[in-house]
Image (spheres, coloured by chain):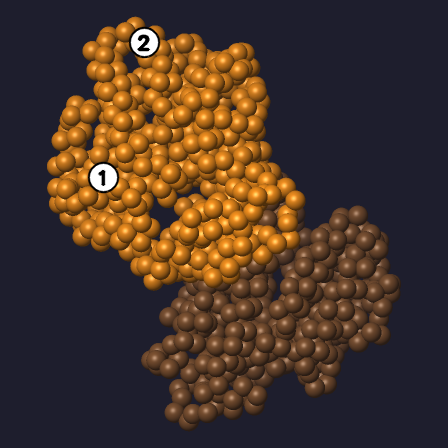
Chain colours: A orange, B brown
Amino acid sequence: MKKRSPFSRLYKLSKEASLLSGIHALLEWDQETFLPSEAITPRSEQLSLLARLIHEKRASRSYGKYLSPWIDLTSGELQRHDLTQEEKALLREWRRDYLLATKLPSSFVEEFAWTTSASIHAWTEAKQTSNFSLFAPHLQKVIDLCRKKADFLGYQEHAYDALLDLYEPGLTLSSLRPLFFSMKELLMNLVQKIVKASPPTLSKIEGIFPSAAQQKLGQELLVTLGLPSSASRLDLSSHPFCTGIHPLDIRMTTRIHEDNPFSSLFSVLHEGGHALYHRNLPKEHYGTPLCEAVSYGIDESQSRFFETILGKSLPFWHFMRSKLQTFFPEQFSSISTEELYLLINQVEPTFIRVEADEVTYGLHILLRFELEVAILEGSLQVSEIPDAWNEQMQKLLGLLPKNDREGCLQDIHWAMGGFGYFPTYALGNLLAAQLFTRIEQQIPLWGQQVENGNFSAITSWLHANIHQHGKTYEAKDLILRATGEPLGVTAYKNYLENKYKKIYAL
Amino acid sequence: MKKRSPFSRLYKLSKEASLLSGIHALLEWDQETFLPSEAITPRSEQLSLLARLIHEKRASRSYGKYLSPWIDLTSGELQRHDLTQEEKALLREWRRDYLLATKLPSSFVEEFAWTTSASIHAWTEAKQTSNFSLFAPHLQKVIDLCRKKADFLGYQEHAYDALLDLYEPGLTLSSLRPLFFSMKELLMNLVQKIVKASPPTLSKIEGIFPSAAQQKLGQELLVTLGLPSSASRLDLSSHPFCTGIHPLDIRMTTRIHEDNPFSSLFSVLHEGGHALYHRNLPKEHYGTPLCEAVSYGIDESQSRFFETILGKSLPFWHFMRSKLQTFFPEQFSSISTEELYLLINQVEPTFIRVEADEVTYGLHILLRFELEVAILEGSLQVSEIPDAWNEQMQKLLGLLPKNDREGCLQDIHWAMGGFGYFPTYALGNLLAAQLFTRIEQQIPLWGQQVENGNFSAITSWLHANIHQHGKTYEAKDLILRATGEPLGVTAYKNYLENKYKKIYAL
């Protein structure tokens, strides 16, 4: 795209905000990987100052002044008719960013940051001791602020829409509910059938898998996927994550259990999926929304595609088995690919979302979704959350948590004020299946390629259809372009039912 | 100190500048340790934006407005008579920072940053290929900008004074010259005698010393010195350095040669000396000059004290030998402490400053000092530097470099525009000897304590006399308070002559 000079001031402001956001991301990465433990307070102060500077940039009057000749700030109507597709997208997204920033007063942004920081601290302690009452008063403050945030941002039907829009622009509660209703029906049916079915006889993988070897294996796998160490890193942290500081500086982490070679492997695939997306964003547009992930749901579709759909497929395990044999010959030489495939695809209701299998995972999300909507509406009080959680767990997964640590205290999201975030995990699963359906049609030989450790056709397809577009198209349009369908449950249903029918002989 | 409310706005500005400087330091640390190689351009953009934001804070009009009721910005005269020692120091230093920042126009700061960034890049390549002509045009630009910088900053006698003052506030060329003259006489005499003396018979330490073991040894040593991993880190980089992001977040690096166990050890002691200073700055004053190192020379006195005076002393090697024996039993079990002491204290003229022994080291600095003064004056042209360097090397150390890589291209300092920086290395050596003289008097049992791995009396002394004061006193006053003498050559002369008279039986 020709960078028109009248845009140059907008580019400059946008780029400065992007650079500061990248710095903020680096500081968060450092906090989870290398920061000395005593330095947590100075780090919070650095992050809070940066957050304020980013907000000041995004909400600066100059931004509005430079934007308004191009786009009506109130209606979003473009003021010129000779704009390219990319210019239109830029103006749409810059306006969105500007309005989001200006709707939230600086003092509110600061209050939100400090309140959630204290709340995360309290949650950590509450989780460790499984003591919900330590967390409850903090959570109440966070909920109050989230409601206030929704009011500042504005909404038509439901306060939840305002928060959902932060993660999945344009999505509303009323469009999400029928989708999640179908999903729930599908998953509960499938789990019920699987639980009743006779489980296959499974081999065991036992032994010690040294951390250094597992980390090296992860790094090699990432290189195979197209993530060289010259532009990305894999380090250790207590919760795996991926942060794209720039398309040339992608940081992933994993968590390693030395008695289990699979846990880190699937984390690496998950974070690798995010990383490929962020690496393949169009770096010539760095500093603008065109070089940003379009939505949390689409970002999650990339990670879930690599972690589950590809990473738990039979062709992938043909490749992976031979790789594991070179790293851990003793443990992996006497097991067949088919046995491994059965082993990693076991379905069993469990308490912890991040350890859940492909089928039950969605139910963990639906539980959280229903509770958080009720919390925001005020129909569920903070003190009632533990009981409501346990009741839903029994209903959806047939399990009663022994304590809140394995119940409503397991996730950080509410503590950090992330109401509206969980649904994007489910969307990621739905969309990953839609993408896979399309890939199966368009790359019929994908399985043979993957068996041989060749992922380039798949990653090129994702690059062409998702990654390279950044925010050029809105999420719903990008999904339609890439998969030929709007977001729905059909592909997901077909994928899960076909796969598990075979595994469990349903 | 009671934080008077009229000061509160100054505190806020000062703290924000400190936080941004800490973030800048973290990004530089990351660049040298973990940054993926392709990400160097985005990192430069992040650093350059931060440098501008820091300069904007330090030069903001509000700073001047809030300062002027307390201190006359032109004369430095305090406007109130009821100020505490610390308040006086704060106002003195805030005024200094403000004047330094406002004297340099933003456009100049940016030009300087970009020019030196390109110059460092050219220097790296020129050094690799030992091709001075690649570097020469860049160096010319840097020199022009340094002259311009000196003009912006202002000076009374010599442009060099303006630059020297950035590193060693208040020091001038005319006060430095007699000091360096005595130093040169002392060192040339001593080297001459040593070169003529018959060298002691030396044992050899050979073998492979694995990187991981050397790093672990370094980390243990740092803990023994009072640098726990909860507030500091030791990582690897191609040039060792220490950066104090906050007293609770100190980052050190070392470089490891697997065929040499001493190189990293002395780097760790050197960076550990800096680290102890930055860790022991009064953290209750973080965000103000009271929690900053007072000068580069004093900072260097701390690193050189631990690296050379303590780190190359006989008592230290009693302790160190047993530590090395537990890490590398094969190589260190048949060598006595006295043999090790002789081995690590060999004096021999060599080409490379950073590898030089305690005695010849100073001559490397004096060479650079004389050249850089001539360069700034214009009496030495860029094209003449290689020859002038080689001529001085022959005169001072009796050696003729084979190429510019082991001659005038070895250091990064001129490439980064650091004219005026080198002298502080020599000052660090002088001052370290003065501190040691005082410590010997006041802690007569220091040797026995160190033999047993107990450094607390020494580190407490340094804490009480240097570290805890930050910038409360100006450098010259702090030196006088701590050592009872102004900065001079006597202690250094006595220390070196006594030590090497014994080693070489002079």
> Which residue shows up at 31% across the image and 37% down it?
A172
Element under label 2? Answer: helix
Amino acid of disc 1: Val
Relative to residue B199, is residue B86 drawn left or right?
left
Q: Give neighbour class at mark 1: few <14, some 14-19, many 20+ (Cα, 10 Å).
A: some
Q: Give neighbour class at mark 2: few <14, some 14-19, many 20+ (Cα, 10 Å).
A: few
Give the number of the disc on residue A421.
none
Amino acid of disc 2: Lys
> Which residue shows up at 42% across the image and 48% down it?
A75
Give the percent coordinates (x, y) of residue B341: 60, 58
Residue A246 appears in the rendering:
no
The nearer-to-camera label among 2 and 1 is 1
What residue is shown with label 1? A373
Image position of B127 with respect to A392: above or below: below
Give the number of the disc on residue A501.
2
Give the percent coordinates (x, y) of residue B317: 54, 57
> Which residue shows up at 28% across the image and 23% down it?
A183
